[in-house]
Image: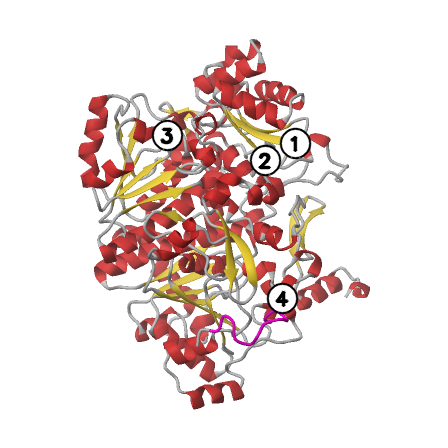
Amino acid sequence: MFDEKFREIMAKNEALEGFRVLDITRIIYGPWAANLMAVMGAEVVHVEIPKMGDILIRAVTPGGVFPRNLSPGMMCCNSNKYYVAIDMHTPEGIELIKQIAAKSDVVMENFKPGTFDKWGIGYRQLREINPGIVYVSMQGFGNWGPISDRPSYDAYAQGITGLAEISGFPDALALKSQAWIGDYLSGTIAAFLTLSALHHREKTGEGQFIDLSQAEVLMRAMDWTWLFMGKTGKTRKRSGNWDMAVVPSLIAKTKDGYVAMGAFPESEFSGLCTAMENEELKKYTDIDLRIKNAEFIYKEIDKWAAGKTNSEILDLSRKHGFAASPVMNTKSIHENPHFNQRKTVWKFEDPVYGDLAYPNPWHLGETPGRIRWGMRPVGFDNEHVVRRILGLGEAEVEQLYNKGVLGKWDENFPATSPPKDWDGKKGILY
Amino acid sequence: MKNWTEWAKENTDPKDATKKPQALDDIKVLDLSQGSFAGIFASSLLSEMGAEVVRVEPPGGDISREMTPEGLKINETGLAYLVEGRNKYHITLDITKDKGLEILEDMLPKFDILIETFPSKYLEKRGLDRERIETINPWLIHCAINNYGQEGPMAEDEGISETLDYDVITQALSGFAWTVGLPEDYTEFPEHSRVPTRMGNWMGWYAGGAMAAFSIMAALLNRDMTGEGQFMDISPAEALMSLNNYAFHLYHLTGQVINRVANFESAAYAYNYVQAKDGLVFLAGYADANWKALCSIIDRPDLV
């Protein structure tokens, strides 16, 4: 597991070393944005409430089981963070938030618009304490506008933007993705915008407020949809596994599985025709002609693919120079030598939970991203945050615990707690 | 103090955008993407934040201009490129010719960021390998974007990697498409629709472009501090893989593969689309309080 390449990556610098992020986000969208900062080396302080923590995501697991007390929902978007549990409904809790904000470069939150302003920890108050702060408010529909007060979920965003409406087969159902892409893509954009704002701050010394809408990010990612509607007055129809703008590029069912294929340049298309031994199709070498006759071409390819195995098609794609890939799943990815050699399959030893694996797409040559730990029990790094970062004394901290301002996990809820065999020490930083 | 909504509107209304400075107005980007909207979207994001982006296309234009529904074009350019060509300066340059390559090399020192989507060894074969690029411009952030990446068995296998870099390949190779679609037992729907399904938009390209732009910005902030550029190897398939919930983490833990669940959620209920009289509608009531409310609305207290 810890081969040379792993050690080489761990020994390199991290791009965002020295930046601190105060992450008061919930569920996925906000946590993922802050997670991206953390995989690049920022010190991310993730705030939850004592005992239950962010229970709406900690409780998320298929089948209701929590192996080793891990929560699949929590672990997938909260790695490398420092976990503190603060009751923000107390004045002392708000005071702690202000103190951390004063020492941070970025604040990320995804509470309903205006909540933090009301609590005295919104952008208007925090910039008084810390004028350089970059404050990112991640909302379903933004901080203002007719529907800005609506709560959002990924599936809501996929529905209201029309993304689901253009996905799936025309003669079946509109489809959302199983993955919470409305959260993940928007979180990724949030992290990009945050870094842009930090670059601006490097030049000017000024922080700023960022208002990001999840629905707007999905709309932005719907390629030619809006221009098509504007130009033709028609809505965009679903086209199943056929891409109607890049003909052919599709997913086809084979004898023993599913294969994605692409053959858009003339050379690739004629390679595909040769592989299919289909002279008729060669008439459609011209791209425009192909797009206009997409349905016929796709039917021909589907028919052909149905009589081949995955490996026959992959062999032919190599021989004749068109693109093809099996539809992979997590098992085939996990076992794939390519993704393992690249350390995209990132296997590591979590200090609290033991051996884990995460996807790692952050191959930066000099400052590669990495996962140091997966998730933490609620309040696991309280001491690191209030003693090391804030410099509070032992007595003060004890008082905060006694008042319930600071807290840790609840043993009754496995997904908030360390694994049963935890020795009381492993992973503790302070 | 003004109420929050008013303040937020006053301070973030896009109608005032042109009066404000742009975060990346000191950054110059050279985008050599060919036929991949992952690269083109990455440079769009940078341009939207104010970077000066120069698109380099082969004479006659990049093949991405041909990607368009119904063959619709405006002045010979397809709709998709009209969307993502935004804010950019466009030049043509034939880098398959020595003189073209020489001009490219002359341009490199003037840029902060280079984006390209070629097969892994393409530039190297033309004599422009990473070391040479680094010598020409040591502070350059060179972002190579390709599904198979720049290293590893599949990147080095020319039979696999030397084609255009398609969105549909991203969606398949990432394992994403495996988890989208109607399960086999949804027999009320036609058989051909009960298969792993691509997202209708170019989700693979958009995920790849977003992850590339984020990674570029991380490298840029690092350069702000160290003065050093770097090379990065970004795969849209790997980017989309990292946006697929806990599918991967869970497999390693338990051996369970996440499969298609139509419009349901594998780990929470109610959280799904339901068929109403006139269309699909989303319902979420998986937190205890919301579930109780939902049961009360549908008048089924027994389900609480």
Which residue was labeled with disc 1? A257
Image coordinates of residue A282 in percent, x first then y, are 52, 11
* Foreground disc of the pair 3, 2: 2
The amino acid at mark 1 is Gly
Element under disc 1: loop
* Foreground disc of the pair 3, 1: 1
Kindly tell me whether residue A143 is visible in this rendering.
Answer: no
Measure the C-alpha gap from mark 2 to mark 4: 32 Å
Cβ atoms at labels 2 and 1 below 8 Å apart: yes
The amino acid at mark 2 is Val
Image coordinates of residue A38 in percent, x first then y, are 42, 60
Which residue was labeled with disc 3? B34
Bounds of the magenta segment: A418-428
Which of these two is toward me, A216 or A1?
A1
Co-location on one chain, circles 3 and 4: no
Measure the C-alpha gap from mark 4 to mark 1: 35 Å
Which of these two is toward me, A159 or A129?
A129
Cβ atoms at labels 3 and 1 below 8 Å apart: no
Which residue was labeled with disc 2? A327
Give the mark nearest the N terminus, 2 or 1: 1
Which residue was labeled with disc 4? A69
Give the mark nearest the N terminus, 2 or 4: 4
* Foreground disc of the pair 2, 4: 4
Q: Residue at x 50, y 77 (%)?
A: A86
Label 1 neighbourhood size at 10 Å, few (<14), some (14-19), many (20+)?
some
Tag 4 subunit = A
In the rendered view of the protein, which quadrant contains the C terminus of chain A?
bottom left
The amino acid at mark 4 is Asn
